[in-house]
């Protein structure tokens, strides 16, 4: 079967490399990119005209690895309407326009697949959709961004400066074109939105999710939590609460020593899915990078080839904003660092809290408390708040 690859960047070139090397049943007929690639071994396949792909009835599968919403949405919609299967690694496209695209795929009896959009080379979309379908999913917690995990690991273990670590992540092809999307948590946010839609059945738009990045993390707090064996990681969480609402958030979180996510370092991602039949299932692997991500894309393309006349049942419904809980009212444990406060008074104000011995300032892990309540308590103590970081729920 013929495949067209739209976007010859890190992932797209990896897809072509794997398809050329592995001798699979898929032939790359076109590579769409506006840039020139002098001397590239695939020179005969390049086109700058999307219509070459759209109008060629011998192209059954289109791979979209351009990234961004435009023109990806336009191109992908046209391909689906033309009866072509589409595979994408584009998390922004799936998180923002996925509902429209899975609907279009259904209407046109073709597949729209996006395994590579979450967790790079880690299988997570297919396991969640098929292997875990007997479960009611209770929660998903994940390290979903390779770049930030790589940066945090370098900062913690090698005392490397943020900018230097980011530069290496960019050189390795981990970071987004605009790395703000990585470091401010937007990339992880798109991914947890996709997982939430698959787990709980309704689209969640990233703009409705509280999202904090890693740029404000102080090395002092990294050192403090290390004293209790914990690490600070960027965590995406989606959880069905007992009142039926969804608690969905992306933020730096204290990952305790007992958590399976604690030792996940470098570019690795991990996704912990808690199902009511399986309990916790963990998926772990390289969350970014050329061949790791291309591996997931190629697998989807093969799935499309093998199910050419059969739709794979990947579907969810429209967003229900009323179901998204206000994160400030959901109970959690917190790491708090205060200045200008009496230690005994601070601990008494937060029942169940545990002081971190030897840490700077007054640093402790609270018992369960809502963010709203914690902020009020700190105000009433008259203390200076230096840091307040959620403890990861898994
Ligand atoms: N920039 C992303 C990351 C790429 O670092 O995880 C993979 O989605």
Image (spheres, rainbow, N blue to C red):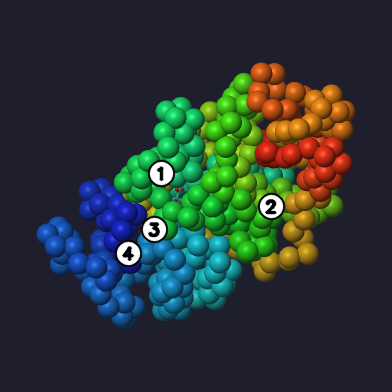
Q: Residues within 10 Å of mark 4 (few under 14, many from 20)?
A: many
The CA span between labels 1 and 2 is: 29 Å
Residue under label 3? 177
The CA span between labels 4 and 1 is: 27 Å
- Which secondary structure, mark 1? helix
Residue under label 2? 248
The CA span between labels 1 and 3 is: 15 Å
Q: Which mark is residue 361?
A: none
Q: Is 363 situated left or right of 242 in this image?
A: left
What is the quadrant of residue 367 in the picture? top right
Q: Is 98 situated left or right of 62 in this image?
A: right
- Which secondary structure, mark 3? loop
Q: Name which of mark 4 and mark 3 comes first in the sequence.
A: 4
- Which secondary structure, mark 4? loop
> x, y (%) of residue 261?
58, 33
The CA span between labels 4 and 3 is: 13 Å
Residue under label 4? 7
Give the residue at the far front of this rendering.
340
Q: Name which of mark 2 and mark 4 comes first in the sequence.
A: 4
- Which secondary structure, mark 2? strand
From this view, report whether residue 249 is shown above or below residue 201: above
Q: Which one is in front, 292 or 217?
A: 217
Q: Residue visible at 75% across and 23% down?
A: 355
Q: Which one is in front, 221 or 277?
A: 221
Query: Do residues under tags 1 and 2 come within 8 Å of each other at their CB atoms?
Result: no
Q: Residue visible at 24% across and 68% down?
A: 35
């Amino acid at each position: 079967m013929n495949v067209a690859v739209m976007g010859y960047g890190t992932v797209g070139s990896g897809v072509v490399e794997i398809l050329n090397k592995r001798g699979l049943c898929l032939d790359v007929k076109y590579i769409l990119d506006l840039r020139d690639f002098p001397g590239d071994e695939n020179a005969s396949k390049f086109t700058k005209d999307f219509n070459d792909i759209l109008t060629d009835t011998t192209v059954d599968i289109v791979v979209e690895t351009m990234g961004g919403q435009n023109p990806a949405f336009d191109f992908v919609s046209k391909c689906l309407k033309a009866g072509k299967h589409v595979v994408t690694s584009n998390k922004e496209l799936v998180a923002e326009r996925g509902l429209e695209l899975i609907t279009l795929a259904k209407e046109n009896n073709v597949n729209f697949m996006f395994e590579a959009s979450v967790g790079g080379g880690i299988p997570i979309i297919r396991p969640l959709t098929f292997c875990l379908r007997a479960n009611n999913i209770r929660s998903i917690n994940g390290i979903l961004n390779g770049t930030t995990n790589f940066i945090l690991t370098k900062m913690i273990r090698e005392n490397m400066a943020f900018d230097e670590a980011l530069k290496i992540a960019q050189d390795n092809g981990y970071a987004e074109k605009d790395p703000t999307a990585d470091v401010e948590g937007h990339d992880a946010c798109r991914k947890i939105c996709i997982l939430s839609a698959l787990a709980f059945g309704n689209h969640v738009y990233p703009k409705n999710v509280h999202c904090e990045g890693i740029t404000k993390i102080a090395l002092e707090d990294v050192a403090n939590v290390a004293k209790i064996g914990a690490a600070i990681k960027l965590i995406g969480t989606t959880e069905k609460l007992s009142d039926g609402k969804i608690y969905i958030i992306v933020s730096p979180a204290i990952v305790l020593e007992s958590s399976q996510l604690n030792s996940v370092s470098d570019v690795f991602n991990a996704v912990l899915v808690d199902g009511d039949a399986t309990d916790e299932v963990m998926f772990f692997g390289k969350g970014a990078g050329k061949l790791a991500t291309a591996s997931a894309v190629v697998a989807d393309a093969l799935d499309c080839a093998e199910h050419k006349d059969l739709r794979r049942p990947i579907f969810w419904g429209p967003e229900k904003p009323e179901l998204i809980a206000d994160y400030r009212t959901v109970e959690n444990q917190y790491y708090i660092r205060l200045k200008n406060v009496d230690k005994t008074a601070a601990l008494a104000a937060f029942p169940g809290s545990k002081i971190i011995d030897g840490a700077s300032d007054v640093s402790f892990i609270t018992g369960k408390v809502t963010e709203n309540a914690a902020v009020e308590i700190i105000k009433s103590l008259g203390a200076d708040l230096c840091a307040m970081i959620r403890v990861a729920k898994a």
